Image (spheres, rainbow, N blue to C red):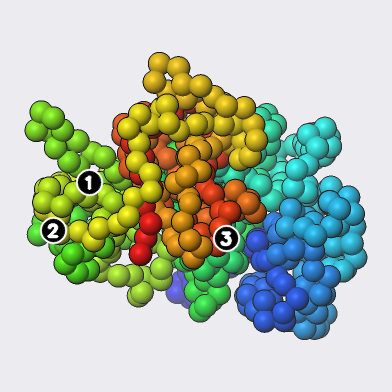
Amino acid sequence: MNFIKTSLVGTLALAATLMAEQPLLKVGLMTDTHVNPNISSVRLVDAAYRLFKSHQVDLIANMGDICDRFYPEGYKHIRNTFNTVFDGDYKPRELFVYAGHDALDTKGPDEAYPQVKIHLEAKNDPFDYQVIKGFPFITVPQGARRDKYKELLDKASDEHPGKPLFVLDHVPPFNTTYNSKDWGSRQTRELLDNYPNVVQISGHVHGSLRNELNIWQGNFTAVNCGCLETWFGILRGTSPYGKRSDEVMVLSVFKDKLVFKRYSLSDGAEIKGTTPWVVPWPFRKESAPYNHTTRMKTFQKPAFSADAALTFAADAVPFNTMTVTHPAASPSDDIQIYQTRIARKDANGNWENFTLKEDFGTYYHHESKRASSLSQSFGTAYFKEGETYLVSVTPVNFFGTEGDPIQATWTAPKTVKATTTFETKDPMTELKFYTGFANGDQIEPVDGFFNHKGGQGRIEFPKSAWQTETSKKFRLIIDLRLIQPGDNTWTVMPRRTNPPQNLIFNIFTPEGDSGIMRYVTEAPKKTQEDTFTFAFHGGRPGKIQVTYARIEIVD
């Protein structure tokens, strides 16, 4: 009898616990789907809908750039896919954020967004406020007017005191989640800093949900949804390559917490299933677990194994490219980047770093597909034949904690010789700096630096440097010292002048005083009139000094 009584009490207690743990609301989150008129482009959206269906979500939210451009056929593909997956009585509610790509090839958002709504058969306007199962959801379009944004925030705050205010916005607030220093909105950050109960959910920057920087807490909470498209990310010293993402989130709202679970659509498995993002509620800034400083202390320092070593390989002799290979460090889940530096001897015989290239760790791959070693390549423009260089590789985790580097020396063998079309003798006089990507004002050097105003700018070379036959490729070699206040950074790239075109994805510059760093990029000549500049974008005002520049023809 006592056994039966005890079992009954235990069963009732377990049932009560399970009932208490049922979420009050479940939301499927995705972003940057970039669908086009081709039906195959909706494949990942279809997979996302099926995963959300398996989790019986109450709401599905798409954070914008729904189509790659204003493609009526693409929006219809999305609607038809939803209707195919949810073909019974169960149909979750939907919210869409209207964003910049959805207005491309139109006269602008005012023309495009009402049409996007019609083609999607969406229920929400660009600015929208809905209450779903007792929780407020604010939807704003990209580039939202601050007054309207604030009006909706105040309304939701007054009507739902103490509850999380879910704000769906394509662009993240500045300097919150990953890549938001370059792609985030300062205006939004300034506004949301006054609303501690806001949980802002965004897209726009493209990234992997395996990146722990995609959740942030300061004066409020911000979460970025990654993308269902290609992402590039931030690398200093080199242009990042494209990587595909198939990741979405399911948000479960409980009385005392918000739980964000991340999933890969390739197999439906939860990403980092033992450590979902759990946001305690009510929000308390002083104890918020996703504060950057707090997390910096909890993530372990990256480390190479005791026997880790660098290996070097030249592609040939004479060589065009040297590749340095290093083993992966641990823990692979938490290493965001590897920094490869090359140092040369200065006049006093001391090692002096003169270039930096970063590469991503293996964190964004499924655990079963992570490489045991990684490589970084450098062309002949970084070396002088017969000189010895010190090469070091440092692992860095998501929160900037560096592991101890491994390093070794390498002596450059005979190099492939290139034809030089321009080489500086007095770079700050021979090269001109202008504001903007075209036209603009010339900035004269002051105390050995160009005082860049921030935003767009460019270094121009003598036009004679580009006078060679069509179909040739130029190599731009430029040594720069950049000084920027605080943790600001710029992006740099070679740029064709006519038609205007960036030739690579952005290279990010180091923060603060970079010291002298070498940048090597290439520019293919397509017409006889082609000329190129070295362009700067983003960031705040700062100083630029050119210490050396050379242009070569690549055979």
Quadrant (top left, top right, bottom left, bottom right) of the C terminus: bottom left
Image coordinates of residue 43 in percent, x first then y, are 65, 79
Q: Which residue is mark 1?
A: 342
Whether residues under marks 3 and 1 lie with C-beta atoms below 8 angstroms apart, the answer is no
Position of residue 340 relative to residue 45, above or below, is above
Indicate which disc residue 527 carries: 3
Amino acid carrying label 2: it is Pro
Q: Secondary structure at mark 2?
A: loop
Q: Position of residue 234 (x, y in %)?
A: 46, 50
Indicate left or right for 208 with 66 as reference.
left
Marks 2 and 3 in Cβ contact (< 8 Å): no
Residue at x-position 17% and y-position 41%: 344
Residue 309 or 297: which is nearer the viewer? Answer: 309
Asked which secondary structure carries label 1, the reply is strand
Residue identifier under label 2: 413
Q: Nearer the viewer, mark 2 or mark 1?
A: 2
Spatial CA span between label 3 and label 1: 36 Å
**Up/down of 246 relative to 419, above or below:** below
Q: Is residue 199 left or right of residue 390?
A: right
CA–CA distance between discs 2 and 1? Answer: 16 Å
